[in-house]
Amino acid sequence: MATHPNIQSNLPLTESTFFILLSLAPSAKHGYAIMKDVQVLSQSRIALSTGTLYGALKRLLAQDWIERVDTPNAAQTGRIRKAYTLTEIGRRILSAETARLQSLVNAARPHTAKEQSG
Amino acid sequence: MNAFHLLTFGYAALIRLYPKRFRDEFAEEMQAVFATAVTEAARSGIKSLLVLCLRELWDLPAALLRERLLGTKMGNWVSRRLSPPVRRGAIGFGLGFALIEIISGVLREMRNVPYNFGIDLPLALLLYPLVGGLSGILLCQTVDPKKRTSSFAFFGALGCGLGYLFQTLTPIPAVPIRGALMGGFIGAMMGGVHQGQKGIVRSAVVGALGFGLGRLVGCFVLTSIRFDGNQAPMLTGYADSSILGPIVTGALGSAVTGMIGGAILGAALGGYRAVGDPPHAGGYTRKRIFGLWATVALPMALLAWGVTPALIPRVNLHPTVLYWLIITLGMIWQLVMAVWILRREGGGLDWATLRRRLWLDAPRDPRTGESPGRLGISWRLVLCGFVALLSLGLGTLLTSLGFLLFFRFRLPSIFGFLLWPSYANLTELASPEFAGQWGLIVGALVVWAMGAFFAEEFLFRGVLLPKMSGAFGRWDWVANATFHGFYYLHRPWMIPFRLVNSLAVAWPARRFRSNRLAAIVRVAEIPVLLTVVLLGVTSEVFGPLPTPLILPQIKDHPAPADWQRGAMTTVPTYDPDSSEIWQMDLRSYDVSALDLRASVDDLLHADFDSRTVWPTAGRMPPDFDRERILALGKNPGLGVHELHAQGITGRGVSIAIIDQSLLTEHQEYIDQLQWYETSDGGVSMASMHGAAVASIAVGKTVGVAPEADLYYIGVSGGLEILFPYYHSYAQGIRRILQINEQLPQDQKIRVISISLGWSRQGSGYYDVVAAVEEAKAQGILVVCSSIEKAYGFKFHGLGRFPLADPDAFGAYEPGTWWAKWFYDGDRFSDRLLVPMDSRTTASPTGADEYVFYRQGGWSWAIPYIAGVYALAAQVDPTITPERFWGLAMETGRTIELEHDGKVVSLGPIIDPVTLVDALQND
């Protein structure tokens, strides 16, 4: 649906969006796995409810940042389990956001180091 | 069904609340994920399961809202603002407060306790801390990176519990202030745990503002859906007499309070983590500016609302003069503060430094820095000056509009305490009490100059404005005007005026780096002040009463009115759906050139008089019998003529009327008129009002008590054009009492008729209320539009078709101006109903001329009641106002009317004959 001529214009991401994208970075995951992963990645600061999770997934799908894929074990279990994975755009946005956060940390480090030593 | 099935079943039901498209895409998946989550959580224990379910429930409303509104402009706006702390604050407190209301309401219902009894203290002290604690936990998850859940729970509970306790114990009745008090405690506790000492004050302020605003909006919403039309006891709560059930109303009101307060507090707590104060470039910090404002504004409020009322009974000075003197002390304090600040800045107090520091130099071009000419005039400046002057008018308009809305939405019931006390009303200086005291003008000017230049302009524009850009950037002028506007805590009704005016002068002051324009505009306020004071100083007062009293004494003879209306060229029409009065006003018009044959329905709604020149019979509708209409209108009706025939005519009883100028020579009452006097030396022309009220009360053929004596005090009505002015009426009542002292026992004045009501906004309100009390103390009934406030009596005026028999009770109907509301359902049976519409009265145009008023107002009903009281006093000289009203209500007749196929009751209609019978047989 949506196109993204400028990655930067989509930044910064909300924490929830960032962690959802981050959790999908290594491999495709289904809803429950994303929920668990976000909790672990955020060190339990963010616990998504199903409503919040699927609301976010819906928007990410609409923005083409993620897409649906067949789950690897769907055939074995016989259950319908949709999984989600990052699209190319999603991956680029995640990288851009990570770089942005990294630059913030880099900028802050010398000052906070000075404060701590002084 | 086990717990797992129950939960997944419930979850499936909740998912139905999402939009269909969303459900089609995700419902199945969501249910599967939820089922897995439940299974996993159950393995970790009941606590995890509970947390999971609670999380789903808390997030549900926002998720639903987002999905339902997503894509719409409003949806995006809302979702951007619904940050997690805002959401959780709103849901925690909103839902919590509503639940408290529901629980306590249900318990009350079960025990049959009346609604406004309030929640039991022990129950409240259990539930409020619970809500506070849970909301604290919710907020903690989103605002506190350290997740100190137990601390947030404890302090949230403490804040909410203490807040409830203090709001219950406070003697302040205004609901929003009680809400603010509670919010202050909640905010202080949450802010304290979140940010330590620093957070206590600001979160307390935010909490107070949030919950105060929430309570106000709650009250406002629920007041506006009230249906009974009475001024509500909103001081005590939301629920009483709302169209919704008391529990639902209470829950709704509490939910609104909690949602707004919680959202604002949540937003603030969430914001503190990331946002700090902006840097301050040289000027004052926000904290310092706010502190300065508080240092000057709060003492002024204390002086006006605390010190002045405490001193009024102890100091022998006119309350308004005392108020201005005390306020001057506050202004001197401001001057001292301003000088102290300048000294501390160390720039010296010499004139050159002060000119620079206070922006007292001529305006400079913002680009070149040059002064635009010797006189400092440029077209931009002239335009700014014009706008600033305009702002005085706009500010006044806004203040008036504010008052209109204030009353339209019945806010006095919540904010009545903000209405000005009489002593703080500048127009009180227009009282006749100050007649001849020319020194007052000098005093008023000195006090005004002190306040305008040496206090307000000096501090706000001179000291503060040049130092505000650091804290407020390019919006410093808006901040300056806001601080200046809200400095008026001592006269809150002036806040809109000062705010608008201050905006208009602060902008040019900042742009041209000069406060001269602000000073000039301030001077433009002088004429208003002078007008008000001059009105008082030059007002006329009654001279000493001659002894002995020689009657009759007619001290003025206003000339007959001549409206010179000329010929009417188009046929007027009557629109029954319009509430406009005088639609068919033919009084003194020459309508002889018109063909009115087809206008019978319109003519039956016409007002006309002896001077109306009619077309020839051939061009008049045959069904419009104007002579008969005039004759029927003269009859006071309801059997009053029957009483006259028995000699019950008001003989030996005196009626006083205070009204506009009177045509003293009119044949209807010339023989009854014993006294006519005006306080202002009289006016040249007789009013329409005077002749009508006098003839309705004592007119020979028109009047209810045609042989009662009439004492009439004329009021010019001049000052009322400027503002509601009641001093003349107070003076009039006291003059009547003075006259009454000298009258022999068998000629005493028993009733005063004043066709006017008074509101607290008018000058002299307390004066006239006191005068009415003095009359009451002497056993005199004062019939006026404010009779309900004075005695608790209620009345209304009746309508009548002009050709219907005034003596037949069945001829009457609701008065024209209120019939629509009556038929729409606004019925009553606690008002004494008297004839009002379709009355023929004496006309001010000539001694033997008459006028027919198709539509009347309370003005015509009031002298009618006074007339019946005179009849009653003739029959039973010991009658009292209370006994009269009680008997009149008791003996009044209720009639049945048919309207739109329904039968409705109208009554009690005053029944003079039965009333007199009852008095005679008593």
Image (cartoon, coloured by chain):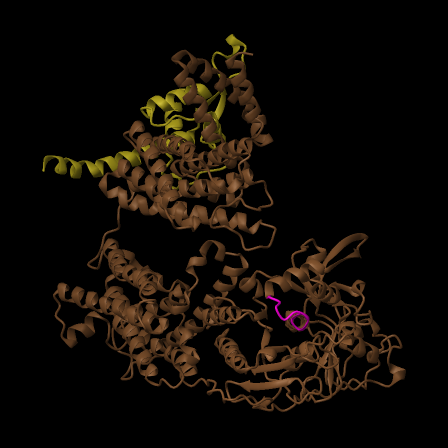
Chain colours: A yellow, B brown
B846 is within the stretch colored magenta: no
Closest to the observer: A61 or A19? A19
Vertical comparison of B542 with B575: above or below: below
Q: Position of residue B654 (x, y in %)?
A: 62, 78
Q: Is residue A110 left or right of residue B558?
A: left
Vertical comparison of B390 with B208: above or below: below
Question: What residue sits 58% from the left and 86% below the top?
Answer: B676
Q: Is residue B824 left or right of residue B223?
A: right
Q: Specify the quadrant of the image occupied by residue B600.
A: bottom right
B878 is within the stretch colored magenta: yes
Vertical comparison of B786 with B26: above or below: below
Q: Position of residue B577 (x, y in %)?
A: 72, 64
Question: What residue sits 52% from the left and 10% below the top?
Answer: A75
Q: Quadrant of the C terminus of chain B?
A: bottom right
Q: What's drawn in magenta, residue-wise? A: B872-880
Q: Position of residue B780 (x, y in %)?
A: 56, 71
Q: Specify the quadrant of the image occupied by residue B667.
A: bottom right
Task: Tell me, yes or no, if residue B377 can be seen here.
Answer: yes
Q: Position of residue A118 (x, y in %)?
A: 9, 38
Closest to the observer: B328 or A101? B328
Task: Tell me, yes or no, if residue B578 can be seen here.
Answer: no
Q: Is residue B500 left or right of residue A82?
A: left
